[in-house]
Image: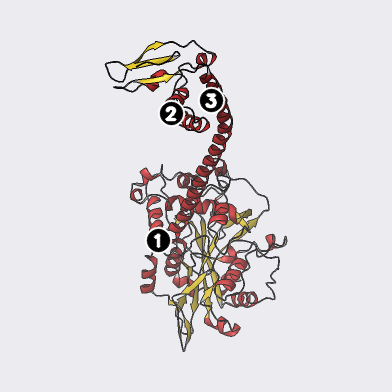
């Protein structure tokens, strides 16, 4: 093969993939000195070949390929065939200058485009990560609704043995306080102390936030309540004021003492719902493991359990659980059950519970309510009015002050309490094993005549769910009979909250005392 001056003749060697130049006649030029062998980048090579081919139609594909390789003449070799690479001389030198300029222009334009593409790719990746995190959170909430009975049983087993073991109130699924009352105490004997001073929470600084999803900025939500409000908000959900439980002293069994300060609802459910969510998202194949193995998989529950009754470790809201026993004219008792709505309520969604139940909190936003409403009996009356009679909820979201001396049904309830037609007892304090939140247990016996005299009718549905277990007949509304057969059927249900199960069990255990009190115990 023969070419004019300035050509480079290359032929293959015998061997695998090797080539050797046989003759180079062109003089070195400025462009050739630049075309030194450099590490090849396949992506840049392909893109440059494509762009150079478009910019200079006079160049053959082999020449553009060689230039893209920055002078690596070996790249033009093809085994078992002859290949000639033309070195730029004369007119070809002008072509080289054009190509070099074009390469610089392409590089200048390509770098910003590459950066923009990278930014969009990073944003897309972050967006997918945020969406996945938030969807996982929503699925965890659904699991809490759908599998709550199963999760209750797991929580009960976790705290029966192993590193998170605690004592239970005998015959119940409720974790007991340090001192348990195995007796009834008139509610008026329970002393309540209130201070407006607030204190921090030890666990706030030491607890990992693994259960919290990412917000729109790609950061963890600051609290569980903040995530719930944006991603899985119940219909009844606002950050109201609560009485934060700070200490319990039951050394004097006749006059137990409870101490409270100011707190908020969102502060409290951050802990209650975090431990529930952590358990709900535990994979199915791990749920049956030994409690000792599960400690490392449940770091939030483990941390809270280690300071279970330490009121300074976290914000504790007290739930007051009251079993209402209606005494008929024939002396027989019936009681009211409530099934909480999955979508309306933030805590204990889907549970069967005694009624009324409510968080201990002021009735209004008025600054005068805080000290006045820190009263257990006033709180129970408000919950009775809302859940059983269907009156508007006084949950602290409004500024309207309640007049307990004039407004119905508070006047009738207080009158019934004073004349012995209504009797209410304190049965103790415990901790729910699922939410690890404090639960007060009370029992109220009210005569049917109080309903008849006041003209009250019990609602079938309220804003938080349904009243269940009752029937309508010519004799009026009848509820679940307070009899051993019904009690035994109910207390074995995992869908019955631990506090309600404890209320029913203890009320049945102390039924004789409930039905035969002395009038002086209630004044």
Mark 1 or mark 3: which comes first in sequence?
3
Name the N-terminal-most of marks 1 and 2: 2
The label on residue 149 is 1
Q: Nearer the viewer, residue 84 or 125?
A: 84
Disc number for residue 99: 3
Are the residues at dot 1 and dot 2 in contact (C-beta closer than 8 Å)?
A: no
Q: Which residue is mark 2?
A: 61
Give the camera-side residue of 156 and 7. Answer: 7
Q: Residues within 10 Å of mark 1 (few under 14, many from 20)?
A: some
Q: Residue at x 43, y 57 (%)?
A: 143
Q: Provide the secondary structure element on which disc 1 rests.
A: helix
Q: Nearer the viewer, residue 519 or 378?
A: 378
Relative image position of residue 445 (x, y in whole percent): 51, 74
Closer to the chain start, of discs 3 and 2, is 2
Q: Nearer the viewer, residue 153 or 50?
A: 50
Label 1, label 2: how many angstroms apart (C-alpha)? 72 Å
Q: Quadrant of residue 42?
A: top left
Label 3: state its secondary structure: helix
Gap between marks 1 and 3 measured at Cα: 74 Å
Scheme of image coloration? secondary structure
The quadrant in which the C terminus is found is: bottom right
């Amino acid at each position: 093969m023969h070419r004019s001056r300035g050509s480079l003749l290359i032929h293959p060697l015998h061997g695998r993939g090797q080539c050797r130049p046989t003759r180079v006649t062109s003089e070195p030029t400025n462009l050739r000195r630049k075309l030194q062998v450099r590490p090849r980048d396949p992506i840049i090579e392909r893109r440059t070949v494509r762009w150079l081919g478009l910019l200079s139609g006079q160049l053959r594909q082999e020449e553009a390929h060689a230039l893209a390789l920055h002078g690596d003449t070996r790249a033009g070799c093809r085994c078992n065939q002859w290949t000639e690479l033309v070195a730029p001389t004369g007119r070809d030198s002008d072509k080289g200058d054009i190509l070099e300029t074009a390469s610089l222009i392409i590089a200048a334009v390509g770098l910003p485009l590459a950066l923009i593409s990278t930014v969009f790719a990073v944003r897309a990746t972050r967006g997918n990560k945020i969406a996945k995190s938030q969807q996982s959170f929503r699925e965890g909430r659904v699991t809490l609704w759908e599998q709550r009975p199963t999760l209750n049983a797991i929580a009960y087993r976790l705290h029966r043995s192993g590193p998170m073991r605690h004592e239970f109130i005998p015959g119940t699924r409720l974790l007991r306080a340090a001192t348990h009352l195995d007796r009834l105490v008139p509610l008026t004997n329970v002393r309540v102390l209130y201070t407006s001073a607030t204190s921090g929470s030890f666990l706030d600084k030491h607890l990992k936030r693994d259960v919290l999803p990412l917000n729109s900025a790609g950061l963890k939500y600051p609290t569980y309540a903040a995530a719930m409000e944006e991603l899985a908000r119940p219909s009844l959900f606002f950050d109201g004021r609560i009485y934060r439980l700070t200490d319990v002293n039951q050394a004097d069994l006749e006059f137990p003492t409870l101490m409270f300060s100011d707190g908020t609802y969102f502060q409290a459910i951050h802990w209650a719902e975090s431990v529930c969510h952590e358990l709900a998202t535990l994979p199915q194949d791990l749920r049956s493991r030994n409690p000792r193995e599960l400690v490392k998989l449940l770091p939030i529950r483990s941390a809270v359990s280690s300071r279970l009754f330490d009121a300074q470790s976290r914000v504790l809201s007290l739930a007051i659980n009251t079993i209402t026993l209606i005494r008929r004219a024939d002396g027989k008792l019936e009681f009211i059950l409530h099934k909480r709505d999955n979508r309306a309520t933030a805590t204990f969604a889907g549970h069967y519970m005694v009624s009324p139940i409510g968080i201990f909190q002021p009735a209004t936003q008025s600054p005068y309510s805080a000290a006045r409403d820190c009263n257990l009996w006033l709180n129970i009356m408000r919950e009775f009015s809302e859940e059983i009679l269907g009156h508007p909820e006084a949950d602290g979201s409004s500024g309207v002050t309640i007049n307990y001396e004039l407004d119905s049904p508070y006047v009738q309830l207080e009158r019934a309490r004073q004349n012995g037609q209504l009797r209410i007892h304190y049965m103790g304090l415990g901790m729910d094993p699922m939410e690890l939140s404090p639960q007060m247990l009370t029992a109220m016996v009210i005569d049917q005549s109080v309903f008849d005299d006041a003209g009250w009718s019990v609602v079938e549905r309220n804003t938080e769910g349904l009243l269940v277990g009752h029937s309508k007949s010519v004799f009026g509304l009848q509820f679940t009979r307070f009899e051993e057969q019904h009690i035994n059927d109910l207390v074995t249900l995992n869908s019955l909250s631990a506090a309600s199960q404890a209320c029913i069990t203890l009320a049945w255990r102390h039924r004789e005392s409930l039905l035969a009190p002395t009038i002086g115990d209630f004044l």
